[in-house]
Amino acid sequence: MRNSRGQVALALNIVIAIFVVGSLGLVSYEMSRILLAREQLKNCLEMASLAGGVSMASTSQTGATAQSQATTVGLNILKMNAILGTTLDSHVTVCSSVAALNPAPGQTCVYFEFDDPVTKAPAVGAQQGNVLRIYGAYAYPLFSGGFGSIGVNTYTLTAEAMAGMPALDLVIVDNTGSSTDDTTNVTLIRRHWDQTTDNNIIYSIPGGGPGGGGEGTIFGLFCPNLAGSQTNGLGPQNLDAAGDPRTSNCPKEWSETGPLGNTKPLRGLTDNSAPGDAPPSAPPTGGVGMTGLSPGPGNGPTADVALAPAINPDGPRLVASCLNFSRLNSSGANAPLSQIRASAPDETSGKTKMGLSAARWWSCAVKAAERAIVPPAYAHYTDPGIVDYETTNPYGASPTLFTDLVVNLDGNVHFAGYVDPNNPGYVFPSVDYLVEAARGNMENGGVAPNSWISNDLNNVSQPGYQSVYRINAYKNLQPKASVENALLTFVQKVSQTSDCHFSFVAFNDRAGTNSGDFITAPTVSWAYPVAGTTKVAIPHTFLDPNGSGSQAVTKVLTPPSQPADWLPAMMVPSGGCNLADGLTQAYNELTSARSRVGAMKAIVVVTDKVPTRDLAGNKYPDPTANGTALSDAIAVATQCGNQGIPIFMVTIDHENGTMTPFMQEQYSDTASSGLVKTAGHGGALYINNWTDNKTGLASLNGSFNNVVRQLTSIVQEQAKP
């Protein structure tokens, strides 16, 4: 007979096994499913927010349109995913607010919110929120069918994800070297007194010689070496480099230095009463036209030539011998050619026989040459003096001979007239207006004593013409203008999608060290010192621990629009590419006390060439032999890598693809020897091949959008546990 107690115990165990242990197992199963569903919901929201954030970074739209695009992209990504094996394609809806997240069983409800990048709170009033945050809720149907007696049949899970980057300290390093205006459309002008009529100045466009005649881009006219043209649209213009065969493969003879020697002086009056052609009756020298040309000094120390040339024995005479460097020849008498040649630097060593550098020799020569420049002449210009081309050339000067280079304010290859919509009172119907406005001769009817002013130009002369010419020429410097336009969009986009603090470093022969930093260079040429010098801004704006710094960067990049906006120092193209110094300034900025602890750090470099200067200032115009210039930059990239700082290179090849192979090799983000790869940490190289301004700008915007996407991806990876 069975023991009744045993039967009770067995029954009790069965009950416990069925109702207690089974329930515990069921609860454990449900809990594991709930936790898995919550994790999958969070992952879905993160992928959707990242995709939506990338959309915000990539679009050219702003405001509600950009937000709508981001919402659509995020929702599409959600629908491509699943929770607990059930696709969200037909099981997700968009709710109107966080409070409305109340999905039906087995359904997901999401709400898209756009927050302030700094406070991470919803945008208030007119404030534009661009950081995408997605809230989501999933109603999990309990496996048992619910506890119907008490009305519980689902368990609602919630999660959220944000696409915006956390704190980011970013330094923009911008190369503003001479070649950054090489795709600017310009016109070469031969300006001289008409000795036939003795009544006007002739403005002609030289049509001879190699290259694009007298109209076209700077690159097309002068066919520069790979380092780019040293001749610029605005001062410092380096007009002598246009005819220097060491830097120009399509040399155009500038009136003051031509290698044939039969050119000087023909350059006209400037606003500083510099010498120039004038009516024969005007004291003290009169106009020389094309029949009074005298020898010029020949090719000189152009910006991207490492060594100054020896004097051509058949070329120019200097005014004083530089054989004796202790003093200049105060009498101004011509030195014998034998002395000049004897004192000139050797091309191999770059030193004189006395051991002095080429730079010192040329400094002496230029100062000595200043004594021979004729006194200020007088201006006389007439609108009817324009001709397509004239051939008066009795002294055998090159048919390419020009005196002025002006920027076509209408942006076209052939200048057809322009009126600034912001300053409609200043008209530029033809090239003579460009020439005289650029020189400063349109400011009034008496720019020099006893000036000869024709009725045509005198009636429109007014203060501000030179500034209006300059601000419109500045806007037409390409690819520089497109680069700055794209950078402005980039700064705005990053500001709206992250808590970013900005610094900006401009560099050419060296990098800027403060916001007001500048270098000086001859306005027209080293061979025309009486025209004075130009200040070239190379600003460096610092990181601000207490602010974004975006306004300071925006101010630097925004072109002037009114005459009063033209500053004594503008960020005009000049010099080479000392990338090592630019990176050094950026590295120092990101490792200084101004950089926030815990903030992600990154550098974005914009340049149109490989390095041409090393930290010692030595020149390397040949990209195939720029050893130290590159190795100095690589050394700084190594330091960046050690500190976890990625480098993003946004480059422009406006030389028909010839610079691309060198950029791919030296800046590579895949080869171990490449600069970007050396820094590592997700940096990338983007090369934009320039065809025209419109497509060039679109390509640059695409590259900067890629930088934002890459930064977003890096941040997401760093944020993962």
Image (cartoon, rainbow, N blue to C red):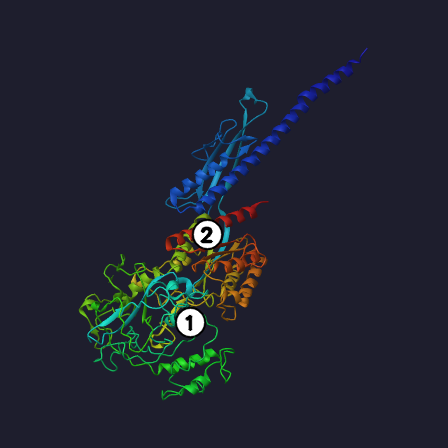
Q: Secondary structure at mark 1?
A: loop
Q: Residue at the location (46% across, 52% down)?
A: 703
Hey, which quadrant is residue 472 in on the image? bottom left
Measured from the top left, where is residue 688 in percent x and y?
45, 55
Classify the position of the C terminus by image quarter.
top right
Asked if one can make out residue 116 in the rendered structure from this viewpoint, the answer is no
Closer to the observer: label 2 or label 1?
1
**Callout 1 amino acid:** Pro
The answer to which of 168 and 52 lies nearer the viewer is: 52
- Whichever of callouts 2 and 1 sits on the residue coming sooner in the sequence is 1
Vertical comparison of 204 with 701: above or below: below
The residue tagged with tag 2: helix, strand or loop?
helix
Residue on which disc 2 sits: 703
| Residue 186 spot, x, y in % from top left | 33, 63
- Residue at position x 54%, y 49% from top? 714
Local crowd size for mark 2, using a 10 Å CA cut-off: few (<14), some (14–19), many (≥20): many
Answer with the quarter of the image where residue 668 lies: bottom right
Relative image position of residue 624 (x, y in whole percent): 52, 65
Work out whether residue 262 or residue 96 is closer to the camera in this orientation and state it. Answer: 262
Residue 245 disc label: 1
Disc number placed over residue 8 in the picture, else none: none
Classify residue 435 as left or right of residue 50: left
- For label 1, the crowd category at 10 Å Cα-Cα, with few meaning under 14, some 14 to 19 and many 20 or more, is some
| Residue kind at label 2, given as amino acid type | Ser
Q: Which quarter of the rendered picture does the N terminus lie within?
A: top right
Q: Nearer the viewer, residue 163 or 425?
A: 425
Residue at 60%, 30% in the rendered image: 33
